[in-house]
Amino acid sequence: MRSGEHFSPPGERRLEATYGPHLEALCQRSARALTACGYTALLLHSGSRLPVFEDDQTYPFRAHAPFKVWVPLTDAPDSFLWFEPGATARLIVHRCADYWHKPAQLPQDYWVRHFDVRTVADHEGARRELPADLSRAAYIGDAFAELARWGVGALNPPDLMRWLDFPRAVKSPYELDCLREASRLGARGHRAAERAFAAGASEFGIELAFLEGCGQREQELPYNPIIALNAGGAVLHYQVLEKQPPRERHSLLIDAGAQFQGYASDITRTYSAGDADFALLVGRMDQMQQTLCAGVRAGVDWRDVHLRAHRLLAELLREADITRCSAEEAMASAVTSVFLPHGIGHLLGLEVHDVAGFMRSPQGGDIPRPEGHPNLRLTRVLEEGFVVTLEPGLYFIPQLLDAARADVRRARCINWPRVEALSKFGGIRIEDDLAVTRDGRENLTRDAFLETA
Ligand code: GLY
Ligand code: MN
Ligand code: MN
């Protein structure tokens, strides 16, 4: 699909048009899953508020993905979805009856008319909205105390969950609209963060700019932003967010995404504060990332994308004088894994690291990772409708460099003075979100950045 074809925001009417077919397909595949596993109905839980030990606070609420795939209701804990094939699905929304919290609003959106909606004040009220006999129903969600008395046939049965999770890798047109909008919101946040970095903000200041740019509070984001100045970029999931700017500024690595209707974006950019050599290295990584993106299409084994990334990185390391052995030797001795220890990407959707990355089929069996690559999160062959991240990196990670220095074969491959000089920049990651189309891929992230330029 041509880049830039999807610039209109998904207005209510467009979502209304695509949501119906999404729900229809979901009903069909859920009915098949129930039949295959011997159940007659499905009871999905939105999730519980989890209390902090000895406190009257709860942790930020995150709705369960198997519930969110049905309804974009992300802030209604203790709600339920009841599905029996052939009948209108019932949405049981929990509205607290106290005066300490604002009750969840009864949704009025485009999707509500597809459901038989009931509101309840507690678990007992929810139980009354369900059939008396739940012995042939499967329940998916938290095992809250009263559930033991509800008489459900099974609690989170693995075979059924597998049947439900496997097809989530292929996104419906409605889901693609949501993912495009999540990318747009994320790109706005990234633009604001880049400006804050240029103005000399701290890591925390850059996060505030990101939040304001995408218009979301931290707990609405799909994951905690990774915002690292300088050597912090070598910590893959850096979480500190220093409040003071460092005395010297070399680089920024920002990995942050936004959420729309429960769907996530997952975007990383790396910037040089002024050093031309590091800026050149970032530019090379960007080119390599684009080369890899161009190879994404239906029928491609994701393990081959990952291994190709290591081959391209081996060449790049040599060209940048970071290694001094052949690309073949860098691959054979796993030197590339010293600089790139994570997977090349993963499925993206309702969860940032979306489910079903290894599944061979709904019936069972996992596809193994390539030997020597324990952190790859996706091993399936790409299909039209998959949405994946593509995120090559090049890091200077002290623990991995120390281990390589202690190993003669790898140690002699590496140009140590060059590595020492680059370590203050931490690392580089460039991460885009791609939808696999009939004849190639759509880059949700680059399209979104173009739109927010
Ligand atoms: N933001 C985590 C990741 O890129 O996988
Ligand atoms: Mn990612
Ligand atoms: Mn990321």
Image (cartoon, grey):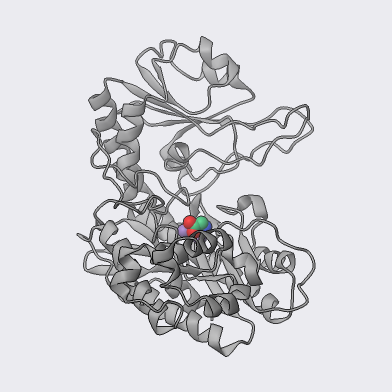
Q: Is residue 367 visible?
A: yes
Image vertical order of residue 214 relative to residue 85, above or below? below
Across and down, in percent, residue 73 comes to 53, 42
Query: In the image shown, does 164 or 134 lie closer to the viewer?
Result: 164
Q: Nearer the viewer, residue 237 or 38?
A: 237
Residue 237, relative to residue 308: is it above or below?
Answer: above
Residue at 43 percent across and 37 percent down: it is 66
Q: Which residue: 44% across, 83% down? A: 320
Q: Position of residue 319 (x, y in %)?
A: 39, 84
User: Which residue reaches farthest bottom?
Assistant: 276
Q: Quadrant of the C terminus?
A: bottom right
Report x, y in % for residue 383.
24, 56
Residue 10 in sight in this render:
no
**Label tally:** 0
Q: Is residue 181 above or below residue 139?
A: below
- Pick whichever, 344 or 63, lies toward us: 344
Q: From what the image shows, is residue 67 above or below residue 273?
A: above
Query: Quadrant of residue 201 in the image?
Result: bottom right
Q: Residue 205: x, y in percent?
A: 74, 68
Q: Residue at x 71, y 27 (%)?
A: 97
Image check: 96 left or right of 1?
A: right
* Quadrant in which the N terminus is drawn: bottom left
> Residue pushed farthest front?
408
**Viewed as shown, does residue 360 lie left or right of 72?**
left
